[in-house]
Amino acid sequence: MSALIPRPTTEIAPGAVHVPQWLTLEQQRELVTACRGWATGPVPIRHTRLPRGGVMSVQTVCLGWHWQPYQYTRTAGDVNGRRVAAFPDWMVELGRRALTAAYADAPTAADCTPDTYTPDTALINFYDGQARMGMHQDKDERSSAPVVSLSIGDTCVFRVGNTETRTKPYTDIELASGDLFVLGGPSRYVFHGVPKVHEGTADPATGLTSGRLNITMRVTGLPG
């Protein structure tokens, strides 16, 4: 019953905006189909290995630029040496529409306007029921343009912290399938993470029967 009740757009902190149910079911299905294609390559989805030897529990595939801690490159030297799939123009438009939706009531919250926002990379993370994401900042980009985040599949607990520390104060919210979340302006570099995924909450109509897809669009600020 609760899924039928519209949830309001909420500014969790200045520039950190949650827009529930932003993606339609059709858009979610299209994104799931696209992500399945990208997951097969040219650089396939993988568990990223961290510099100290640990392995991330989420699986990641990248578009436009390849991310590995803590840098972006055009080719995936830590996987198969191939160039990652291109960042499609239609995702640029999707990112611009997302900013318009998030900052409609707070247009000064971002460091750019929707018309000038031009993401050039996406990190696509897949969470199974046991995957987690520790508190971290998205700061490998040279640009302070907002990060646009889209959720599909299982609902997760999303923890929004502060810019100084991984610990409290933080706010926990739930991100459900179709939700949009934007980190920009004063909240561009807040620590954030995913401490829990609620297994079995995905709607099969999205094309994803289990697990959670998280698509984050960013502006690297890198040339070429």
Image: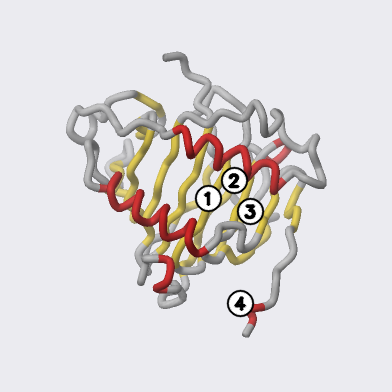
Q: Secondary structure at mark 4?
A: helix
* Marks 4 and 1, the one that precedes in the sequence: 4
Q: Which residue is mark 3?
A: 160
Q: What is the distance, in whole Å, between disc 2 and disc 3 at their CAs?
A: 6 Å
Q: What is the distance, in whole Å, between disc 2 and disc 1 at their CAs?
A: 6 Å
14 vs 47, left or right, is right
**Dot 2 and dot 1 residues touching (CB under 8 Å):** yes
* Marks 2 and 4, the one that precedes in the sequence: 4
Q: Residues within 10 Å of mark 4 (few under 14, many from 20)?
A: few
**Dot 1 and dot 3 residues touching (CB under 8 Å):** no
Badge 3 amino acid: Val
At horizontal 53% and vertical 29% (from top left) the residue drawn is 219
Q: What is the distance, in whole Å, between disc 4 and disc 1 at their CAs?
A: 28 Å
Badge 4 amino acid: Ala
Q: Residues within 10 Å of mark 3 (few under 14, many from 20)?
A: many
**Dot 2 and dot 4 residues touching (CB under 8 Å):** no
Residue 175 % position (x, y):
57, 63
Q: Nearer the viewer, mark 1 or mark 3?
A: 3
Q: Secondary structure at mark 1?
A: strand
Q: Which residue is mark 4?
A: 3
Q: Residue furthest bottom?
A: 1
Residue 76 % position (x, y):
26, 30
Closest to the observer, 197 or 147: 147
At horizontal 70% and vertical 68% (from top left) the residue drawn is 7
